Amino acid sequence: MREGRGFMKIEQHVIEAVQSKTDIVSLISEYVDLEKKGKDWSGLCPFHDENTPSFSVSEDKQLYYCFGCGAGGSAITFVMEHDNKTFPEAVQQLAERIGIETGLEGAQFEASARKTEEMERHRDLYDAHELAAHFYHHLLMNTVEGERALNYLLERGFTEEELSSYSIGWALPQNDALRSVLVEDGYKEERMVEAGLLIATDYQEHAVDRFRNRIMFPLEDENGRVVGFSGRLLEKDEKLPKYMNSPESPIFDKSAVLYNAHRARRAIRKENEVIVYEGFMDSIASTRHGIEQTVAVMGTSLSTKHLHQMKRMTKEVTICCDGDDAGWTASYRFAKLAMQEGMHVKVALLPNGMDPDDYLAKHGAEAFQRNVLDVAHSFLSFVVQYAQRGKNLTLDYEIEQFIDEVLRELAFSTSTIEKELTVRRVSDLTGVSTETIEQQLLKYEAKRARTEREETKEMKPRLVVERPVERNYTERMLLYYALTDHRHFVRIMEEGDVFNDEAFRVIMIHLAAFYERRGEPDPYLFINELEDRDHHAIVANALTLELTSNDEQAVEDCIVHLRRERIEQSIKHHQQLIHEAERANDFTRALEHMKEVVQLKQSLERSK
């Protein structure tokens, strides 16, 4: 396989030189109007809309942090986030800016990403997908064989700039077009079969191309690396599926790849909203019309992995599926899962038979925004419409079914106002009194409590801690001490699982590996070694604190405080279970939780 493709390593001394010689204030001033505020600089955040500056840049610490949206990190992180670059690309860009030689050519960064052990192990799979994307795109844009597909796409509203930006291509009808290119480039057939680019057959001595005679859409992960493809037939064929996606492989997990996520990251954070479509054609059309905070699930079901990826950018999600029956069903499924994951959900509805691409092409962006997105329904408002769909509410049994479907979801609501409004609306639609509906709702709530109690019996109750918008100050303090003094890090690790926030615990694992390699603290170098961009922001936020590094008593106080906080949260958890048990008349279970509360309170007293 030829050298010079894929994951090119940047020497550590180059990264350190870039970090030390880049003036972060000068860099960010090229993007943001900064004003001196005390010893730091302040301006409007470039990552979300705001009228009052909450974006701070520390000249001393060479870090930035937004107290509004939580974005934060180093100069390298800023370029990655603002310009949507991978880590090597950001280092290269900053190195060129200050005149440092990295020893690598710019072309080597086209498909680069942070180097990890797993990435290195599957480097050939990533590189082969990059090569395939370039090959397919070349066939579409520069060959006679690709003309029909190119003309079709142009007629559908694509521009040549879009085709290039999304690397859309064309797969030839021949069964060995891509195989010949891959083999010539030194790739092994069995690995390309594993990658999903080729298919092994019994009737030929060599593997054949998986995709043939299709318009090719590269599927990219959140770092912008091509990990798979979706091929669309140009002409309808009853014997073949309209769309065919790559199979899962060591680098492609369908449940984890959100189409367009890496391109839309900045727009999502800026608008504090993500719009989820069923198909990538809808996402492309939306972006074309200036609505850029969009992702798509590529026709597969929305997964918890997708939602976790979105939650790193925003908790506000708008579901916008097709206007047919399948689209309504998908909207309900997507919205319900997003609600369960703690996101704030709205559902945008389209006229029957239309998809977002159709609507935008026919009516334009302004109408789409005004008539679809701006009037999106809350989850329960959508549930009422979804349950009503296709029912005749003059028939008793369909009225009963309708009420049943709505109350099943309403029973999970914690909002008194939302419950009252929904009950009143159901009453208006059915003619059933609000009193009767409320009585029925109580039964569903009791049933829900019983179900949760049964689930609790099946597994040991665990403490669920919601992550606050503003990170726990004590945890930030403790992380600061761990980052700036190795002795404090050792003391914190001796305590065990002291952090309540999962993200902090993960950062501590990375910090342990960092100390093992270097032996001494360097928080500004450490932040650039973190792969998760949220972790960048957490570390940057901790480093904004003005603390004394050698304060051993403060470290002990933080550990005690967090220990007590965890016990207090556990007490609240058991008190909630007591309340639910009493509502369900399960006094034996309530007594068990009361005993747990007594023991926890004793532990709390001992920890003073």
Image (cartoon, rainbow, N blue to C red):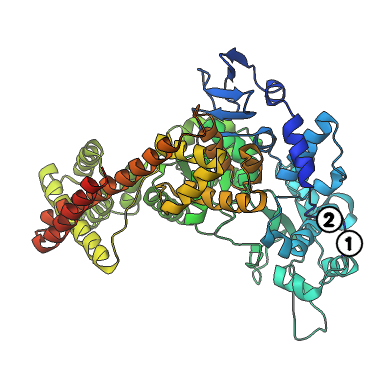
374 vs 300, nearest the viewer: 300
Q: The C terminus appears in which quarter of the rendering? A: top left
Above or below for 22 versus 529: above
Q: Is residue 176 left or right of residue 547?
A: right
Residue 23 sits in quarter = top right
577 vs 150, nearest the viewer: 577
Name the residue located 30 percent from the left edge and 66 percent from the top edge.
459
* Secondary structure found at label 2: loop
Residue 581 sits in quarter = bottom left
Using the image, tell me which numbered label, if any, was put on residue 244: none
Residue 584 can be seen in this image: yes
Question: Could you tell me if the residues under marks 1 and 2 are in contact, i.e. CB atoms within 8 Å?
Answer: yes
- Badge 2 crowding class, 10 Å Cα cut-off, few under 14, some 14 to 19, many 20 or more, is many
567 vs 313, nearest the viewer: 567
Q: The N terminus appears in which quarter of the rendering? A: bottom right
Name the residue located 23 percent from the left edge and 62 percent from the top edge.
451
Residue 373 is situated, as x and y percent measured from the top left of the image, at 48, 35
Q: How many marks?
A: 2
Q: Amino acid at mark 1?
A: Arg
Residue 56 is situated, as x and y percent measured from the top left of the image, at 56, 23
Q: Is residue 558 left or right of residue 288?
A: left
Above or below for 65 versus 223: above
Residue at mark 1: 2
Residue 354 can be seen in this image: no
14 vs 560, nearest the viewer: 560
Q: Whole-Å distance between the Cαs marked 1 and 2?
A: 7 Å
Residue 4 is situated, as x and y percent measured from the top left of the image, at 87, 55
Q: Amino acid at mark 2?
A: Arg
* Secondary structure found at label 1: loop
Residue at mark 2: 5
Above or below for 186 versus 346: below
Residue 183 is situated, as x and y percent measured from the top left of the image, at 87, 70
